[in-house]
Image (spheres, helix red, strand yellow):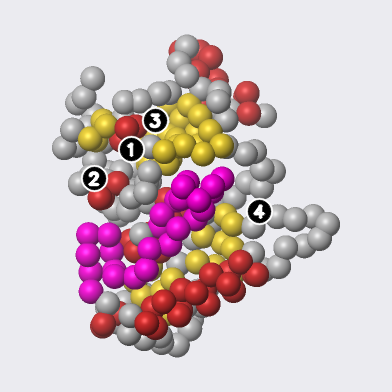
Amino acid sequence: MMHIALPSQFASAFNFHRKFSICLSSSTIVDGIIFLGDGPYELLLNVDASQLLIYTPLILNPINTVNPYIVMETSIYSAFTKAFISTTASMNITRVATVAPFNIYFNSKNVYSTQGGATIPTIGLVLQNNSMVWRIFRANSMVFVNGDVLCLGFVDGGENPIPTPRTSIVIGGYQLEDNLIQFDLATSRLGFNSFLLFSQTTCSNFNFTSN
């Protein structure tokens, strides 16, 4: 199936590398972009986003999903949210009543905004080793409900059924916004960065005039 997918077909037809990248925009006005083939990926302010990528092995998985928010298996979700609540409590960030689909809500009045979003603990997903970490900053972890309430944009996916386990953690579209993700099919590796805004650009800033 991998060889009949659109990126593989384009790579064969136009003789470029079997790679594709996605950059989802957080803007409701300006779209993100999909790149077929290799970089450079020129964004405004002369940022080549391909130079910001770090790589981890790409493991094929039979699960195919388009979750809007990150989903965790129950035991992982419980341990993660317990630690997150403890950390935010130490920062004097108060919780408020819960409303589905999320379980963790906070009062935003004592949370100030920064370039990376609300001042909430950064979340690290450790990949193949402790030095390979996908960092989820506040803009990708917290969802504003209204002016006074924001919530942790993570969902309890239920217990893993046995003997047919699902993927324990599935990263949602919200967590991918303003992150460049590259799928290198030829070498089976995944390239990612952690939040383009810290490089003074976003996924809506592709420079269409560059060569």
Instruction: Tell which circle, 2 or 1, labels the residue nearer the N-terminal end.
Output: 1
- Name the residue rendered at 65%, 70% in the picture: 75
Q: Which residue is mark 4?
A: 167
Q: Secondary structure at mark 3?
A: strand
Instruction: Tell which circle, 1 or 4, labels the residue nearer the N-terminal end.
Output: 1
Q: Are marks 2 and 1 in contact (CB under 8 Å)?
A: yes
Task: Give the Cα separation between the discs numbered 1 and 4.
Answer: 27 Å
How dense is the environment of label 2, judged by Cα within 10 Å: few (below 14), some, or many (20 and up)? few
Magenta span has 177? no
Q: Secondary structure at mark 1?
A: helix
Query: In the rendered structure, which amino acid carries the disc numbered 4?
Result: Thr
Q: Which residue is mark 3?
A: 35
Task: Give the Cα separation between the discs numbered 1 and 3.
Answer: 15 Å
Q: Nearer the viewer, mark 1 or mark 4?
A: 1
Q: Quick one: 88 or 48, which is closer to the camera? A: 88
Q: Which residue is mark 2?
A: 199
What are the residue bounds of the magenta stretch?
A: 112-136
Q: Secondary structure at mark 4?
A: loop
Instruction: Tell which circle, 1 or 3, labels the residue nearer the N-terminal end.
Output: 3
Task: Give the Cα separation between the discs numbered 2 and 1.
Answer: 9 Å
Q: Which residue is mark 1?
A: 52
Task: Give the Cα separation between the discs numbered 2 and 3.
Answer: 19 Å
Query: In the rendered structure, which amino acid carries the disc numbered 2?
Result: Ser
